[in-house]
């Protein structure tokens, strides 16, 4: 999975994934589509349709993976903040708040 042993090698993996994502987006996908409609029609039919679809698919998967890591880190940081005692909280949390708290605590244990 995307988050296995994130605490051990997370930054190295994160950095390499971000560099790969940036290169795919800026050096390949954007450069292909910025050439204009005539260029697109000329090359897409002949050769580039398969490779560009595959590249965009991999790019999308990598974007989703990075989004899940960011979400995990956000939940973990919220969970760490919620573990501190809060004297002002007198009303019991709603079901949605409890589910969010459980998600945050699970994220803390993952990291």
Image (spheres, rainbow, N blue to C red):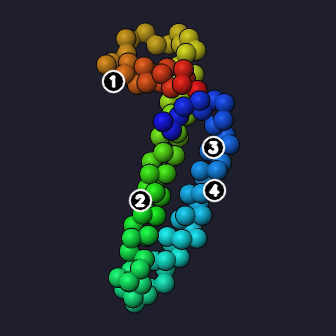
Task: Report the residue marked by disc 4.
Answer: 19
Disc 2 versus disc 3: distance between alpha carbons?
20 Å
Earlier in the chain: of badge 4 and badge 3, it is 3
Earlier in the chain: of badge 4 and badge 1, it is 4
Disc 2 versus disc 4: distance between alpha carbons?
17 Å
Answer with the quarter of the image where residue 102 lies. Answer: top left
Task: Report the residue marked by disc 1.
Answer: 96
Which of discs 2 and 1 lies nearer the camera? The answer is 2
Which of discs 1 and 3 lies nearer the camera? The answer is 3
Q: Is residue 15 above or below residue 46?
A: above
Looking at the rendering, in which quadrant would you find the C terminus? top right
> 106 or 40, which is in the foreground?
40
Q: Residue 57 — which label?
A: 2
Judged from the image, the secondary structure of the residue bearing numbered disc 2 is helix
Earlier in the chain: of badge 2 and badge 4, it is 4
* Residue 34, image x, y percentages: 49, 80
Which class describes the residues within 10 Å of circle 2: few (<14), some (14-19), or many (20+)?
few
Q: Which residue is drawn at 51% across and 26% down?
A: 107
Q: In this view, does 84 lie above or below 5?
A: above
Disc 4 versus disc 3: distance between alpha carbons?
10 Å
Judged from the image, the secondary structure of the residue bearing numbered disc 3 is helix
């Amino acid at each position: 999975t995307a988050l296995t042993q994130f605490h051990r090698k997370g930054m190295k993996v994160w950095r390499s994934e971000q560099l790969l994502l940036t290169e795919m987006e800026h050096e390949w996908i954007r450069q292909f589509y910025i050439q204009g409609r005539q260029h697109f029609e000329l090359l897409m039919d002949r050769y580039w349709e398969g490779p560009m679809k595959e590249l965009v698919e991999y790019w999308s998967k990598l974007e989703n993976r990075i989004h899940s890591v960011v979400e995990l880190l956000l939940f973990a940081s919220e969970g760490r903040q919620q573990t501190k005692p809060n004297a002002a909280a007198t009303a019991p949390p709603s079901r949605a708040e409890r589910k969010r708290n459980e998600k945050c605590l699970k994220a803390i244990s993952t990291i």
